[in-house]
């Protein structure tokens, strides 16, 4: 029993779930959309078969399900992928980021549960997809419905998303985060970047170098190794330059998303601040906001739509 | 005993060795530089401590060392790295690719062995290194001493090398091969490229796309995954496109090395032919030649220099 449970909290009115590839986060919510309790788990989509989602969720909710009432659950993220709990087919852009009416209903063994999974977004030219980020964008727009510009969502597959009139017009994903992880963990560079430290000056020089010659990324990567061999460059300098080269190359390709555009970065972590600093060096003052907060707000917006539908029928 | 040994061949006059990161290749040579026998092993640099090189080599040479005479050994490749048998410090370009006088002498326990390791090449602006490729270039120039143009050496870290007057003027390495291995084996793309097949049409379209927008590499990589999810693209198409995107991006950055330049590709494998086809699509008719043949010829050139030195003293 957690400390929160021992306070005998009110029974939750509904459950908000962000179910990602490698983690999930569950919020027990009251009728005023206040958080009663929050739970984390590492039982992400990649480690679960479809039949395992329900018991994992029930265990996380815990005794709060004791009441016999119906308990509404709204999920976003990879739980809606083809390999997830139940497929929530992508909606095609341009469209609003979150549409509760398009959510997939999931059959459960426990009759008290009423589960909906929000769909991700797809784009056909060029091919692109997102799952989970659309709910963060929905949360951001719930707070700023008139925002016109670009939302940047750093991460394993960073996304740049053009917003107008409350809609996602187009977006572009970059494999920047995954490449950083592969190169620093499994390539010939791994010996040259063996540190957790970060140096902003080396990072920003690399951002500028990559913006000036983005086609040179794959040779600049080998140069990092050569410099480490020839000049014994410190790991913190090499790691910061690796990050700067990858993010600078991304900025070069995403230029139409940020040049002379208002940009909001969803991601207050170190990575979000790196993107902010890189944009700042190019004269763009991007605002920054918290991921979990936007996700929660996006799920609450979906919940409000659900209640409207329920009341209307 | 191998079939070759049972023919009681002549005792070797010297031994040629190409000692790479993950493999080595040993040739037993007669006084006329003809190959008496050839041996392979997977005991490359990455699996050996410095003390293990001599026993590994003696075991591969086998009974041929039975005579009491001195046996000269010339090595090229990663055996000369700091983590190898003995460090052969890099020579700085511009310089001739192979200089026997700069070879490192290795102390051995067996007094019959006289071992030399050829050094690699370094470049300080931009930082770059090679070990092993310089000997292939030396072999190529032994056959074509008047070649003026570019030598391209595809592989884990593909190299483009500008040659004039028998010298390496400058060079540039690209992490293309290593990125292909990481992306196809360990990234989110691995499920989308699960095949060994190759389709030249998809490859060449991707080469052209990357040449037109080389800054977009990291988003094009994510698009491969999205296309596979949205349109169920065949693995052979995705794998060929992945190769084409990486090689096309490399061609964009290496343009000064191949545009309006004679190009010789050292590498007759499928990868070498892919580079040849990519260059052909850009109007460059590159010749292609065999790696092992150039390596052998380069080691023979070093052997000739060794004999000259010995005769002169």
Image: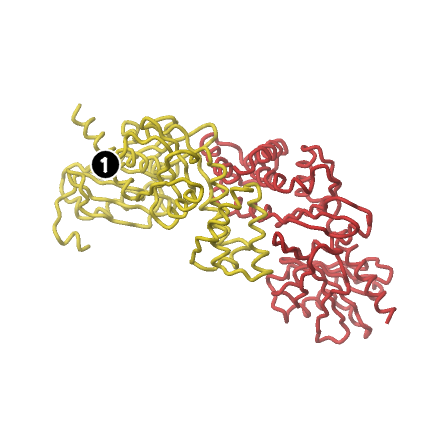
Chain colours: A yellow, B red
Q: Quadrant of residue A128?
A: top left
Q: Quadrant of residue B286?
A: top right
Against B136, residue A118 (above or below) is above
> Nearest the camera: A255 or A176?
A255
> Nearest the camera: B194 or A204?
A204
Q: Residue furthest top?
A: A313
Residue under the image location 54 percent in, 42 percent down: A212
Residue A313 can be seen in this image: no
Q: Number of callouts in the render? A: 1
Query: Which quadrant holds the C terminus of chain A?
Result: top left
Q: Position of residue B176 (x, y in %)?
A: 59, 46
Q: Is residue A194 left or right of residue A151?
A: right
Against A103, residue A10 (above or below) is below
Q: Tag 1's secondary structure?
A: helix
Q: Position of residue B107 (x, y in %)?
A: 70, 73
Label 1 CA crowd tier, 10 Å (few <14, some 14–19, many 20+): many
Pointer 1 chain:
A
Against A218, residue A228 (above or below) is below
Residue A53 can be seen in this image: yes
Q: Position of residue A304 (x, y in %)?
A: 21, 32
Residue designated by label 1? A300
Q: Position of residue B253 (x, y in %)?
A: 61, 41
Q: Quadrant of residue B259?
A: top right
Query: Which quadrant holds the N terminus of chain A?
Result: bottom left
């Amino acid at each position: 029993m957690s400390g929160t449970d021992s306070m005998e909290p009110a029974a939750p009115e509904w459950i908000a779930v962000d179910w990602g590839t490698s983690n999930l986060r569950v919020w027990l919510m009251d009728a005023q959309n206040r958080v009663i309790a929050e739970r984390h788990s590492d039982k992400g989509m990649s480690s679960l078969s479809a039949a395992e989602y329900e018991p994992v969720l029930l265990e996380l909710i815990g005794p709060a399900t004791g009441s016999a009432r119906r308990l509404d659950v709204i999920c976003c993220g990879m739980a809606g992928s083809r390999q997830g709990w139940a497929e929530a087919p992508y909606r095609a852009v341009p469209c609003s980021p979150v549409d509760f009416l398009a959510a997939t209903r999931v059959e459960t063994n426990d009759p008290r549960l009423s589960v909906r999974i929000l769909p991700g977004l797809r784009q056909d030219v060029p091919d692109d997809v997102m799952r989970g980020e659309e709910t963060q964008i929905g949360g951001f727009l719930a707070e700023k419905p008139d925002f016109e510009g670009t939302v940047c969502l750093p991460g394993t597959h960073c996304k740049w998303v053009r917003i107008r009139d409350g809609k996602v017009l187009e977006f572009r994903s970059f494999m920047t985060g995954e490449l950083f992880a592969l190169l620093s963990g499994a390539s010939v560079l791994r010996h040259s970047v063996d540190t957790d430290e970060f140096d902003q000056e080396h990072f920003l020089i690399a951002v500028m170098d990559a913006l000036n010659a983005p086609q040179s990324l794959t040779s600049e990567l080998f140069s990092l190794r050569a410099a480490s061999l020839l000049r014994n460059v410190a790991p913190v300098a090499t790691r910061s330059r690796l990050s700067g080269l990858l993010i600078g190359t991304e900025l070069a390709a995403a230029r139409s998303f940020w040049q002379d555009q208002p940009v909001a970065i969803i991601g207050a972590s170190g990575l979000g601040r790196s993107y902010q600093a890189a944009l700042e060096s190019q004269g763009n003052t991007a605002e920054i906001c918290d991921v979990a907060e936007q996700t929660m707000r996006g799920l609450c917006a979906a919940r409000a739509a659900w209640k409207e539908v329920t009341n209307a029928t």
